[in-house]
Image: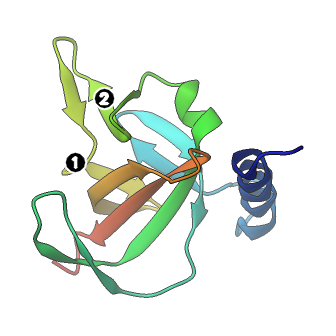
Amino acid sequence: MRSIAKDISRGLREMERRTQLDPDDPDLLGVADLELPCVASSFGRQVEIDPEGNEVVIDLKVFVRREVILTTDLEIVDGYLFTDDGDSPVPVSGTEVTFRGRTMLCVMAKESGPRSHFEFSLKDQAAA
């Protein structure tokens, strides 16, 4: 029997291939000097609750397969992503990331329920 996580991961991999604007230039999310293949959501702005409980307007949600994260220097702690600054983990939430040439603020970076991918909730810095 196939697991839901494997099915979602396969679907995201196929969407990475099919949704890129230029076949020679795939969508990449720039996080902590890493470039991660990803799939952007199709919805517009929405309101989410950040880890501190505040309402935040999200401009974009980006999905990165868990298997991609596991091949990087990013760490998974309690379902959230951290980078290693040399001394201690630093949360990806609250850091600047890049997507399609735009600098955005990562409001949240958390693992999906089935543990197939990570969801990055992004706020456009230019719109702030």
* Picture residue at 28% right of the left edge, 42% below the top: 92
* Secondary structure type for disc 1: loop
Residue 14 vertical placement versus 88 (above, below): below
C-alpha distance separating marks 1 and 2: 10 Å
Q: On the image, numbered disc 1 is attached to which residue?
A: 95
Mark before the other along the chain sequence, 1 or 2: 2
* Picture residue at 18% right of the left edge, 51% below the top: 94
Check whether the beta carbons of the residues at disc 1 and disc 2 lie within 8 A of each other: yes
Q: On the image, numbered disc 2 is attached to which residue?
A: 83
Q: Position of residue 125 (x, y in %)?
A: 22, 69
In depth, the one of 7 and 64 nearer the eye is: 7
Among the 4 quarters of the image, the one containing residue 20: bottom right
> Split into 4 quadrants, where in the image is the C terminus?
bottom left
> Split into 4 quadrants, where in the image is the N terminus?
top right
Residue 127 vertical placement versus 96 (above, below): below
Q: Position of residue 121 (x, y in %)?
A: 36, 64
Q: Position of residue 116 (x, y in %)?
A: 62, 46
* Picture residue at 44% right of the left edge, 88% below the top: 44
In depth, the one of 85 and 10 nearer the eye is: 10
Among the 4 quarters of the image, the one containing residue 55: bottom left
Instruction: Tell me the amino acid under the disc marked 1.
Output: Thr
In depth, the one of 20 and 50 nearer the eye is: 50
Neighbours of disc 1 within 10 Å: few (<14), some (14-19), many (20+): some
Q: Image check: 75 left or right of 1? A: left
Instruction: Tell me the amino acid under the disc marked 2.
Output: Thr
